[in-house]
């Protein structure tokens, strides 16, 4: 579920629903708590979170997108 | 079910821009300045839609007061990532293009897109150490809001959540407008227009992508589905070089374009730099190893020298902060959130990079000239429909409006168009998909397509494989047409986009069969050498009655 909306904070303004380029909140309405109807279509770029006036949107990163990272042996570099 | 389920509304305008990307917005702004009545039809919400929706940070341009002589500038630029593309367009095109970029940078800055960094023009990345830097770093995060308000200020109407689907033609073959379908309601729109610009962006998803399992996690947005290319083709315009794929690279799994914003060094697991250019990070130039040879990372993995990492170790705190700033200008918010959530500190931790699988580049697209005119009178195209990049979209969109203004002034209104026939046909198709009790989901159709493109027209190509693959693709396409099921208008727009990809894929197969040579990433197992007679030529395809005509020029 990419965007995760905090029920306590959300003021049902509908701005995330209006802005999302992929329309993952399809069917949600201003005045109601938004439903993430198509989470797998999310592009993960946070158009919604940038728009949200009360910072109510967090993200759960899908397991498939977790980036492989590594601390490289620094002494090999000069 | 009957046509009446769709509400139908009609509009009249001088200039219709299909796709509210950078090309569409710049075209509309310029056309409105020339006095044309303009409407932009946009599939999503124009403020955040398309490849530029969440921002960009590199704008290729020539600023005389920074670069000095144009001749010295262009000589270096031709050596870099964009060199081949510019050579294809020719020296006159390149000169006209770069002088226009200078004007646009200044225009954007005046409108409120900050084109300067700490008070001056700052060029960095995509460059050879010690040579000309042609990419201006700019703050593109909110560029589309700025351009949208400039368009609105000039009276341009913006119609969001409408997908342009089919062009309308006059009896004489000139363009007469387009039909669009709502992505949220069962509604259809008929736009009568004297001139039309196609600016629907890149083609995404023609081949399978590496982060399997998350359909939306592709380097560009999922809803960029070659709608413009296929509308153009069906209306009689030429497409070119569809069989010439390209490669890109970037962060692994969290796939995203914008690799040059990473200011570290590519290294193997022992810390040894992969390329010859840098042994410590250099934000001014960036490590262009990947741009010189896009498949380098994948090759290293296959040869057991990987995995390969982008390593920022050595950047100062201030440089790291600046790199984060640019990552945010380019829409990498969720990626940065991911690093925060995981406690990944880029000061001492490297991130793995990957060569992304085949993709269709902007140069495989609609054919248009230096006035952005296609061969269909009144039809223009710009941006990723045929050139590429932010500056490319801004300039070609602008040029389209210059030409369209002249065309519209001289255009007599035509008596009638094929509008009713087109409306009847599309409504029938849309209703069938919406009203079917059950059927294939668009993701199923997409995966079936990608299996076929990858297996028969992917990295390995041969006549026998492609002939067989094409006939199989046509069979699956028939099934898709007969079984695709859309629960609602959102799913309908996805189904229609995927069907456009099927049509485009068939043209790609035809063109790949016809190109009996190996060149670039078009690798024929049965024709291993390049056919030197084709050097400097492009491969074209257009519809001629019920046939597709191919040619070389
Ligand atoms: C993450 C990322 C970073 C990038 N960084 C850079 C960079 O730093 N520098 C650079 O030069 N380039 C960069 N690019 C490429 C650049 O963004 C594109 O080349 C540019 O946006 C192309 O502009 P365009 O107007 O052709 O298409 P887009 O900006 O993609 O706009 C296409 C528009 O058409 C709409 N649309 C699609 N289909 C339809 C339809 N059927 N009906 C109606 N509307 C439709 C889309 O919703 C979209 O709004 C980057 C791309 C990405 C994805
Ligand atoms: S923008 Fe924020 S506050 Fe408004 S509906 Fe969406 S989550 Fe709720």
Image (spheres, coloured by chain):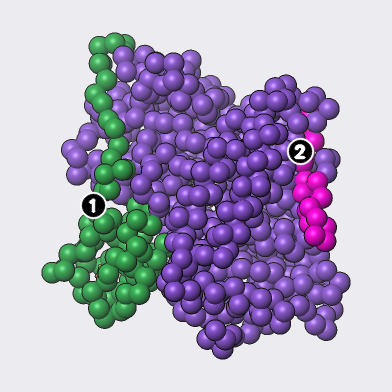
Chain colours: A green, B purple
x and y, in percent, of residue B135 in the image: 54, 38
Query: Closest to the observer: A10 or B232?
Result: B232
Question: Is residue B89 among the parts visible in the rendering?
Answer: no
* Ligand 1 contact, mark 2 (Cβ < 8 Å): no
Q: Quadrant of the image for the N terminus of chain B?
A: bottom right
Q: Quadrant of the image for the C terminus of chain B?
A: top right
Q: Is residue B540 magenta?
A: yes
Query: Closest to the observer: B150 or A2?
Result: A2
Q: Is residue B293 magenta?
A: no
Above or below, comparing residue B525 to residue B200 in the picture:
above
Task: Specify the principal SS of the magenta part.
Answer: strand
Q: Which residue is mark 2?
A: B514
Judge from the rendering whether residue A31 lies leftward or rightward of residue B260; answer left or right.
left
Q: What residue do we see at 55% from left, 25% from top?
A: B292
x and y, in percent, of residue B173 in the image: 83, 69
Judge from the rendering whether residue B211 lies leftward or rightward of residue A5; answer left or right.
right
Judge the density around disc 1: few (<14), some (14-19), many (≥20) Cα neighbours within 10 Å: some
User: What is the C-alpha distance between the residues marked 1 and 2?
Assistant: 46 Å
* Numbered circle sitting on residue A60: 1
Q: What residue do we see at 69% from left, 76% from top?
A: B422
x and y, in percent, of residue B468 in the image: 65, 41
Q: Which residues are magenta?
A: B535-550
Q: Nearer the viewer, mark 1 or mark 2?
A: 2
Q: What residue do we see at 38% from left, 43% from top?
A: B212
Query: Closest to the observer: B207 or B116?
Result: B207
Q: What residue do we see at 55% from left, 69% from top?
A: B163
Q: Dividing the picture into quarters, in which one does residue A59 lie?
A: bottom left
Give the secondary structure at mark 1: loop
* Ligand 2 contact, mark 1 (Cβ < 8 Å): no
Above or below, comparing residue B368 to residue A24 in the picture:
above
Query: Closest to the observer: B167 or B509?
Result: B509
Give the secondary structure at mark 2: helix
């Amino acid at each position: 579920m990419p965007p995760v909306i905090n029920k306590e904070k959300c003021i049902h303004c509908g701005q995330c629903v209006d802005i999302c380029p992929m329309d993952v909140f399809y069917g949600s309405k201003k005045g109601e708590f938004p439903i993430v109807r198509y989470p797998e279509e999310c592009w993960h770029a946070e158009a919604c979170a940038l728009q949200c006036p009360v910072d109510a949107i967090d993200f759960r990163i899908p397991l498939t997108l977790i980036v492989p990272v590594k601390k490289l042996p620094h002494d090999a570099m000069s | 079910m009957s046509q009446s389920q769709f509400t139908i509304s009609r509009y009249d305008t001088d200039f219709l821009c299909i796709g509210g990307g950078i090309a569409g917005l710049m075209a509309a702004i310029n056309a409105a300045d020339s006095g044309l009545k303009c409407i932009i039809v946009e599939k999503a919400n124009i403020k955040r839609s398309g490849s530029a929706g969440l921002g960009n940070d590199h704008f290729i341009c020539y600023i005389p007061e920074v670069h000095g002589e144009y001749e010295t500038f262009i000589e270096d630029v031709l050596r870099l990532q964009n060199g081949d593309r510019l050579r294809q367009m020719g020296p006159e095109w390149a000169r006209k293009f770069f002088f226009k970029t200078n004007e646009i940078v200044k225009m954007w800055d005046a409108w409120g897109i900050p084109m300067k960094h700490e008070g001056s023009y700052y060029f960095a990345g995509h460059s050879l150490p010690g040579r000309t830097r042609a990419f201006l770093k700019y703050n593109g995060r909110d560029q589309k809001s700025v351009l949208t308000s400039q368009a609105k200020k000039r009276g341009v109407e913006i119609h969001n959540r409408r997908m342009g689907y089919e062009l309308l033609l006059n009896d004489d073959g000139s363009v007469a407008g387009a039909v669009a379908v709502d992505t949220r309601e069962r509604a259809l729109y008929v736009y009568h227009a004297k001139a039309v610009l196609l600016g629907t962006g890149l083609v995404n998803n023609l081949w399978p992508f590496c982060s399997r399992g998350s359909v939306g996690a592709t380097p560009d947005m999922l809803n960029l589905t070659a709608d413009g290319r296929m509308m153009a083709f069906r209306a009689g315009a030429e497409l070119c070089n569809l069989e010439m794929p390209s490669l890109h690279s970037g962060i692994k799994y969290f796939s995203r374009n914008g690799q040059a914003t990473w200011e570290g060094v590519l290294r193997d697991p022992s810390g040894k730099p992969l390329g010859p250019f840098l042994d410590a990070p250099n934000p001014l130039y960036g490590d262009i190893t990947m741009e010189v040879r896009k498949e380098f990372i994948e090759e290293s993995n296959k040869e057991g020298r990987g995995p390969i990492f982008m390593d920022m170790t050595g950047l100062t705190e201030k440089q790291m902060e600046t790199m984060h700033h640019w990552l945010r200008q380019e829409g990498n918010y969720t990626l940065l959130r991911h690093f925060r959530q995981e406690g990944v500190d880029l000061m001492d931790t490297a991130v793995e990079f990957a060569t992304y699988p085949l993709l269709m580049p902007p140069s495989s697209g609609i054919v248009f000239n230096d006035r952005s005119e296609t061969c269909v009178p009144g039809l223009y195209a710009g941006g990723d429909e045929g050139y590429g990049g932010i500056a490319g979209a801004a300039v070609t969109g602008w040029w389209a409006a210059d030409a369209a203004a002249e065309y519209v002034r001289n255009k007599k209104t035509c008596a009638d168009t094929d509008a009713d026939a087109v409306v009847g046909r599309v409504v029938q198709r849309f209703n069938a998909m919406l009203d079917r009790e059950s059927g294939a989901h668009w993701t199923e159709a997409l995966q079936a397509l990608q299996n076929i493109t990858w297996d028969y027209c992917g990295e390995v190509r041969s006549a026998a494989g492609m002939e067989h693959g094409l006939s199989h693709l046509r069979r699956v396409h028939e099934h898709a047409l007969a079984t695709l099921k859309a629960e609602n208008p959102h799913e309908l727009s996805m189904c229609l986009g995927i069907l456009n990809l099927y049509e485009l894929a068939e043209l790609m197969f035809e063109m790949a069969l016809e190109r009996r040579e190996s060149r670039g990433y078009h690798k024929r197992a049965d024709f291993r050498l390049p056919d030197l007679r084709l050097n400097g030529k492009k491969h074209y395809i257009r519809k001629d009655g019920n046939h597709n005509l191919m040619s070389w020029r």
